Image (cartoon, rainbow, N blue to C red):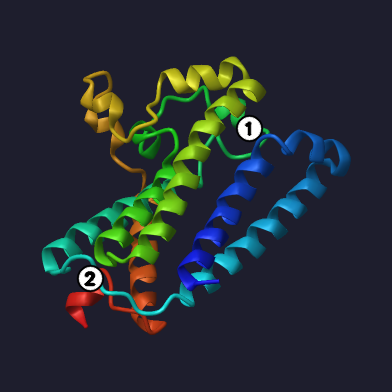
């Protein structure tokens, strides 16, 4: 199989298995295996398909970029990754979408910080990761990988809205009514003040730390320099 075709197949397996296990197969598997058993199976399949995807991506021969990537584009991508890192770190605390018994109570709180930006900050962080990488690595294989990640993140978010509404009922519907799927959707519509989107400390400082560490890791692991390190190195 051609390397690019193998990448397409592994991306389809990665994304497809997540959608199947998160929605149509979840209930029957939980009934058979229990919640704990299902999470083990889900984790094994997710890790296995991710490893296959990464290996397939690494196996694609060098490709000619579709456009030149200069400092202005790198600066935009770097800013996008900083924003994505803040969204991700902010999503780890006070997120009613995460599987926690406290989710119904959390969903009653006023959306602040990253949740005033979007009710799916973690998923948008992954989608923005895909966008930033496609901008500075404009090759067919990167487009396939970034597209798969974005599809899983944003398609999963839409599916999560339906699943959470079914599982949490009015709690989730009330949360959805006070938040936006699209980043800054409520602010751009004039419904919610921009001040609500100021990130909390764990999101801001944790996001900056993650961004610095991840972009430093690009160069340390032998990939192209990224982030501020591109100009400081």
Q: Is residue 209 visible?
A: no
Q: Nearer the viewer, residue 102 or 189?
A: 189
Which x, y percent locates residue 178?
40, 20
Q: Residue furthest right?
A: 32
Callout 1: few (<14), some (14-19), or many (20+) C-alpha neighbours within 10 Å?
A: few
Q: Evaluate whether residue 185 shows in this view.
A: yes
The residue at the point 55 percent across, 71 percent down is 1
Mark 1 or mark 2, earlier in chain: 1
Judging depth in this view, the residue of 57 and 31 nearest the camera is 57
Which numbered dot is residue 115? none
Image point (40%, 79%), residue name: 61
Q: Is residue 87 above or below residue 173?
A: below
159 or 139: which is nearer to us? 139
Q: Position of residue 78 (x, y in %)?
A: 24, 61
As drawn, the label of residue 228 is: 2
The C terminus sits in image quarter = bottom left
In whole angstroms, how far apart are the C-alphas of marks 1 and 2? 38 Å
Q: Residue furthest front?
A: 1
Residue drawn at point x = 52 percent, y = 18 percent: 173
The kind of secondary structure element at disc 2 is: loop
Estimate the x, y position of residue 33 in percent, counting from the top left.
86, 44
From the viewer's perspective, is 19 left or right of 111? right
Q: Does 199 sit above or below residue 225?
A: above
Residue 112 rendering spot, x and y as whole percentages: 37, 32
Between disc 1 and disc 2, the foreground one is 2
Tell me the SS state at disc 1.
loop
**Horizontally, is 177 left or right of 198 in the view?**
right
Which of the 4 image quadrants contains residue 22?
top right
- In the image: residue 122, left or right of residue 97: left
Please name the residue that numbered disc 1 is placed on.
102
Q: Residue at x 32, y 75 (%)?
A: 63
Q: Residues within 10 Å of mark 2 (few under 14, many from 20)?
A: some
């Amino acid at each position: 199989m051609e390397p690019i075709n193998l990448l397409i197949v592994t991306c389809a397996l990665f994304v497809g298995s997540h959608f199947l296990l998160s929605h149509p197969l979840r209930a029957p598997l939980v009934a058979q295996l229990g919640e704990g058993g299902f999470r083990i199976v889900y984790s094994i399949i997710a890790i296995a398909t991710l490893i296959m995807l990464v290996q397939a991506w690494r196996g694609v021969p060098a490709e000619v970029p579709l456009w030149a990537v200069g400092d202005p584009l790198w600066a935009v991508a770097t800013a996008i990754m900083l924003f994505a890192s803040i969204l991700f770190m902010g999503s780890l605390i006070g997120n009613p979408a995460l599987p926690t018994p406290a989710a119904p109570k959390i969903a009653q709180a006023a959306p602040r910080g990253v949740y005033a930006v979007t009710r799916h900050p973690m998923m948008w962080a992954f989608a923005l990761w895909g966008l930033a990488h496609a901008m500075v690595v404009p090759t067919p294989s990167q487009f396939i990988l970034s597209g798969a990640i974005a599809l899983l993140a944003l398609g999963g978010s839409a599916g999560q809205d339906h699943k959470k509404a079914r599982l949490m009922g009015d709690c989730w519907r009330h949360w959805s009514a006070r938040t936006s799927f699209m980043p800054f959707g409520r602010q751009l519509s004039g419904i919610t003040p921009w001040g609500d989107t100021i990130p909390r400390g764990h999101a801001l400082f944790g996001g900056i730390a993650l961004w610095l560490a991840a972009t430093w890791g690009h160069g340390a692991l032998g990939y192209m320099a990224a982030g501020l390190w591109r100009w400081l190195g």
